Amino acid sequence: MPAVVVVHGGAWSVPDKLAKAVVDGVKMAALDGFSVLERGGSALDAVEAAVRNLEDNVTFNAGHGAVLNADGDVELDAIIMDGRTLGSGAVSSVKNIPNPVSLARAVMEKTPHLLLTSRGANLFAESIGMATVPTDTLVTANEREKWEEHRSYVAGVREDFNSKWAHDTVGAVAVDSAGNVACATSTGGIRNKMVGRVGDAPIIGCGGYADNSSGAVSCTGHGESILKVTLARLILSHMEQGKSAAESSQLALQYMGERVRGAGGVIVVSPSGQWAAEFTTVRMSWAAVAKDNLWYGLEPGERFEEALPR
């Protein structure tokens, strides 16, 4: 069974000055995730590693580099899901955690619950000895400046999502050599969002879903739109009807655009190793690794290929 890792760095209007950084970032994350598979790790291990890499990169809006809410604070959301068992863990509105994807995995493996939020999620992190960091550690100077410029949630949604200054969710999907799939998604949300706002990222079937019977998906874009159409699960329902990963993604994104006027992007992998990266925004950084090749892109229809560095 061919092992594959696909990652995204968010679907939005990436400005030219960030284009190289976001592409380099997703390429590094995809290689990081794939190295886990090469060492015999599971798809679940691979997506966690890839998303942790993106959370540690201040270019992206997840963990370090996250955007600020209306109170000038950082609230983070993440999900991880194992397609073999349908086990899933998620956190929302969590603070001071540099790698919320790993906290989400701990929710899956160490609690009887699927989703912990806000203070409860942080108390759980403390109970298992997970390291926390000051908020300022997660915030870049550029984000603090942009937050000052856009002080209302309405402006944040309208200008942040559509303007060149927005940045968005990160995610990864993978299939390992045993045919098990997994997904992970992580985000800081939308700049100037209301305190406590939760988007699609930590919601099962919306920001992500993984099932060995069909595939794994990680979504990015306008969270409220993705929630309304349960985008991740919608894509897999198309795949269950025999459509390809690419066609299923295109159909679901088209439906979201027509039904609720939402734009976004997705990465998908099937248990057989078929994969896709599709989006309806201006740009989405993505990268995929399979066998001896690395694929990546940023513009619509773009698909560069290069041999894996050895």
Image (cartoon, rainbow, N blue to C red):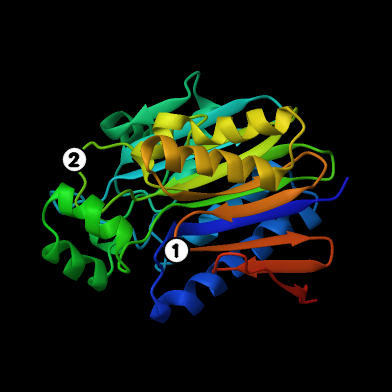
Q: Residue at x 28, y 34 (%)?
A: 118
First-in-chain label (1 vs 2):
2
Q: Give the number of marks.
A: 2
Residue plotted at (55% across, 38% down)? 252
Helix, strand or loop at label 2? It is loop
Quadrant hosting residue 299: bottom right
Visible residue check, residue 129: no
x and y percentages locating residue 57 in the rendered image: 45, 66
From the viewer's side, name the closer residue of 139 and 112.
139
Distance from the alpha carbon under mark 1 to that under mark 2: 28 Å
Residue 110, above or below 271: above
- In this view, the residue in front, 109 or 228, is 228
Q: In this view, does 58 lie to the left or right of 237?
A: left
- Indicate the secondary structure of the residue bearing disc 1: loop
The residue to which callout 2 is attached is 195
x and y percent of residue 79 in the render?
49, 38
Q: Can residue 185 be seen in this view?
A: yes
Residue type at mark 1: give it: Val
Residue occupied by mark 1: 282
Residue furthest to the front in view is 258
Side of 133 where 54 appears, left or right: right
Tell me if residue 284 comes above or below residue 304 in the rendering: above
- Which label lies toward us, 1 or 2? 1
Q: Quadrant of the N terminus?
A: top right
| Viewer-nearest residue: 209 or 136 | 209
Q: Quadrant of the C terminus?
A: bottom right
Estimate the x, y position of residue 241 in percent, counting from the top left: 73, 27
